[in-house]
Image: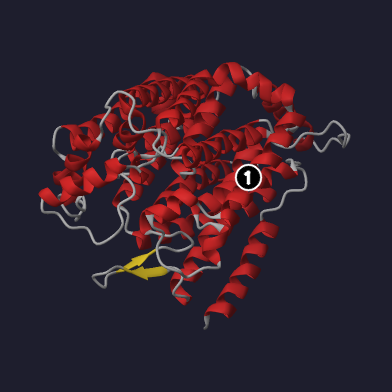
Amino acid sequence: MNGPIAILLCTIGVAFLFYYDRDRSIRNSKALWLPVLWIGLASSRGVSEWFSSGPAPTVQDSLQGNPIDAAVFAFLLLIGLVVLFGRQRRAGAYLPVIVPILIYSAYCLASVAWAPYSLPAFKRWTKDVGDIVMVLIVMTDPQPINAIRRLYTRLGFILFPFSIVLIRYTLLGREWDNEGHITITGVTTNKNMLGLIVFVLSLGVVWNVRWLFVNRNDKKLKRRLIAEGILLLFGLILLRLAGSSTSLACFLLGSTLILLSHTRFVRKRPVRIHFFCLSMVVMGFVAFFLGGAGDVAGALGRDTTLTGRTFMWAAMFPAVTNPLIGVGFDSFWTSPNADVFHHNLNLLHWYHSELINEAHNGYIEVYLNLGWIGVSLIALLLITGYWHAYKAFRRDPELGSLFLALVMCGAVYGITEAGFRTLSPNWVFLLLAMVGSSGVNAGLLNNAQKRTRTQLAPEAAGTAVSTQTARPAAFTV
C-alpha cells in the first residue's frame, strides 16, 4: 500500500473513531478546538515543516523564526484571548489561585531584558503566555471535566493513527542520523518528542479507560470504551516504536499512580498515596544526583552515559556567566554561551553528530536560561502543584488522580529531558494539572460537577428532562 492511499484510509478511520465516540448530550464549546490545534502543532510539526523538506534549522533560523508558524500561533493566541475575554468572569476567578504560575511567567518576561537577543526571546515568551491561555480555555469551558476528557481524545485520535501510518507507509515518519541508524518520529520531528506526546496523552487515555470500564454497563459508555481501548492500543504500540526509555518509564509510573489511587487501600486512607509519590521522587533523586543514572540506564538496556547526557551536563554549568539569573528566557542556545559549551564539550572529547539545542534535563535547562532564581520558581511550582493536586485528590479522587499523575510524571520527566520549555506537551499538561487542581480546591469546578451529576439520577429513572436545564454526565468523554 502506498503512502497517499494509507493516509486516506487513516483519515476515514479517524473520522469513524470520532463518530463512534460521539455523545450528543455533551455540549463543549467549539473553542476547545483551539487548545487541540495549539497542542497538536506544538507536539508534531509546525505548519511550515509539513510542507518543507529542507535542511535542519540553524541557530540563525531559530533567531529569525518562521513567519508562517509565527502567524499561525499568533492567530491562535489572539482568538484564545478573545475567547477568554468573553469568559472574563470565569477566567478572572482563576487568577488568584494560579499566582505561582503568574510569578514564574512574570520573571520569564523580566529575563527577556538581559537576553542577548531580546526580540526573539520576547516572541518565544508570548508562546509561553499562549500555553497558559489554552489551559484556561479548557478549564473555563462550560463543562470543564468533559473538556479535559475530550482534549485527550481529540489529540489522540488525530496524532496516534497518523503517526503509525507515517511510520509504516511513508518516509516522513522515519529519519536516519549521520551514522545510518533509523529513528522513529511519526508526526513529530524526533523520537523523544514522539515518546513525550504519546506518554502524556496515553496517561489521559488510561484515565478515561479506567472510568469507562468501571461504568461499562451503560451502553453508550461501552461504545466509547471500545474507541478509547483502540486509542490506548495505538499508544502502547507507539511507545514501543519510539524507544524512549524516559517516556516509557513515566507512562508506567503515571498509569500505576492513577490505578493505585482508586484501590481500596488508598481510598480508605488517601494519605498513603504520598508513599508512592515519594518513591517516584527518591528514584529520580538517586538516579540523577547520586550518580545512579548510568546504572538505571544500563538496567533499561541503554547507554550508561544516558546517550552522552552526562558529558553534556558537565560542559554546560561552566558556560553560564551569571548563575543567579541565567542567560535570559529561552536564550542559552542562541547566545555566545552556547559556543563556550561546545568548546567545553570538545575538551571532554565527546562528539555528537546532531545539533544540540537542549540540555536534556528540565532543571538544568531552566538554570541555563533563568539561573538559580528560575530553578527555585520551578521548584515552587512543582511543590505547590503537588500539594494542590493532593488536596484535589482528597476532594475528587477521579480528577485528582490524573492531576497527581501529571505533576509527578512532569517532575520525573524533567530529569532526563527538557520538559519545562514553552510549547512542550509536558509543560502544557503540567500547567493543566496545576490550574485544574487549584480550581477544584477553590470550588471553581464543584458547581459544574454538581450540575452534571444531578442529571444521572433522572436519566437512570427514565425521567424527561428539559433541554434547557439538562447537563451531561460528569465523566463522559
Density class for disc 1 (Cα within 10 Å; few <14, some 14-19, many ≥20) is: some
Q: Please provide percent x and percent y for residue 135.
A: 59, 35
Residue at screen point 73% across, 32% down: 142
Up-down relation of residue 386 to residue 117 (above or below): above
* Observer-nearest of 364 and 125: 125
Res. 414 image quadrant: top left
Residue at screen point 46% across, 70% down: 172
Q: Please provide percent x and percent y for residue 279.
A: 27, 30
Q: Please provide percent x and percent y for residue 400.
A: 50, 28
Up-down relation of residue 324 to residue 76 (above or below): above
Query: Would residue 141 appear left or right of 209 to someone viewing this image?
Result: right
Q: Quadrant of the C terminus?
A: top right
Which residue corresponds to mark 1? 74
Res. 390 image quadrant: top left
Residue at screen point 55% across, 61% down: 48
Its colouring scheme is secondary structure
Q: Is residue 37 visible?
A: no
